[in-house]
Image: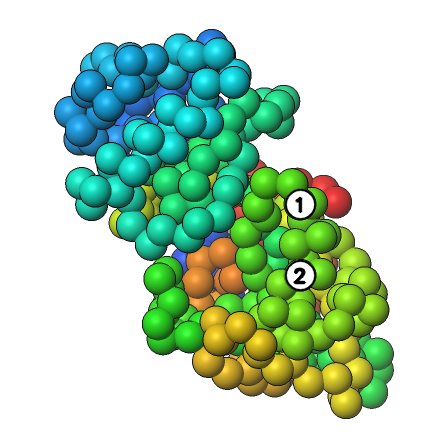
Amino acid sequence: MGNDASTDASRAGPGWGAIEAARRRGVTRVPFVIDGLPVGSVASTHLPALHGLAAGLHVAADRVVLSLDADQRDHALADINDALRAQGLIRAWRNETYSVVDPASLRLLACIERASSRFWGTLTFGAHCNGWLAGADGRPASLWIAQRAFDKATDPGAHDNLVGGGVPLGQTAFETLLREGWEEAGLPAEVMRRATPGRAIDLLRDIPEGLQHERIQVYDLQLQPHEHPVNQDGEVHAFKLLPVADALALAAGDTMTADAALVTLDFALRHGLLAPAFEAALAARSAALWQAP
């Protein structure tokens, strides 16, 4: 894109900062390899902490290789992660199991504690849902926006989508959506099943816990005026029903999580809710982030 007025406008428009954040990299990392496949990456500064943690873990200046049979990997990684946790390198322990997959084929290679996925830079999966109400013309007029609880381990107090959560081992994104729909918003499965898929969004960015390499499946759920979200698990401080313009203003600011801002922006683009100049520039800039449903 050139330096024209529409490009300049798009940089100040909704979601541009979140798009930049989704590809923000600055930490030197080396590949993490299992079964000959690069499944993640480790910060170079953390390599010394890995020496001697397991017989099958080989640490070099240019890569970290786990050379164990499939039936030995999970136990070895659990012991390694316990040691890294004791060193303070893995925080916000969740007691939840995530898959370690080959990003190219999505073949399952091992399982790890959720909190360790950022340390290893492995591909994780999420499910987020935009909750919207229609106006008199049938088009989206307002969005339900959550504010995360202030004691959340990540992004406390930040604004979020109606529903959002990580996909654990053994669940699909839609199954996660149904579970999170009740836990976070008190919406029963028969309501959540009305959700329709949008695009998948890929994030690859440095965060304090390590590297967030995440694929988020976006869903949209049209709610009726009498259907109000009510948190059940203590992870949401409050919900607000905001006009679309106000929700997009949050996505353009710095009080919404980067992934929620991108999910909100995806909704706005798919429903034609942005000014044409913003829409053309943002769609072109963000094409690498999004995959068709």
Query: Which quadrant holds the C terminus?
Result: top right
Q: Measured along the vertical axis of the image, is residue 194 above or below residue 174? A: below
Helix, strand or loop for disc 2: helix
Q: Badge 2: how crowded within 10 Å, few (<14), some, or many (20+)? A: many
* Residue at the (62%, 23%) spot, across then down: 107
The x, y position of residue 91, in whole percent, is: 29, 50
Q: Nearer the viewer, residue 79 or 154?
A: 79
Q: Quadrant of residue 219?
A: bottom right
Q: Nearer the viewer, residue 203 or 270?
A: 203
Residue 244 visible, this angle: no
Q: Which residue is mark 1?
A: 171
The residue type indicated by label 2 comes to Arg
Q: Measured along the vertical axis of the image, is residue 35 above or below residue 15? A: above
* Residue at the (41%, 71%) spot, across then down: 158
In 3D space, how far apart are the residues under numbered discs 2 and 1 (Cα atoms)? 10 Å
Q: Nearer the viewer, residue 237 or 267?
A: 237
Count of marks placed on residues: 2
The residue type indicated by label 1 comes to Gln
Helix, strand or loop for disc 1: loop
The x, y position of residue 127, in whole percent, is: 62, 54
Residue 128 visible, this angle: yes
In this image, 18 relative to 266: left or right?
left
2 or 1: tag closer to the N-terminus: 1
Marks 2,1: beta carbons within 8 A:
yes
In this image, 70 relative to 27: left or right?
right
The x, y position of residue 93, in whole percent, is: 36, 51
Q: Badge 1: how crowded within 10 Å, few (<14), some, or many (20+)? A: few
Q: Measured along the vertical axis of the image, is residue 4 above or below residue 223? A: above
* Residue at the (66%, 76%) spot, across then down: 186
- Please tell me the numbered disc located at residue 179: 2
Q: Measured along the vertical axis of the image, is residue 189 above or below residue 73? A: below
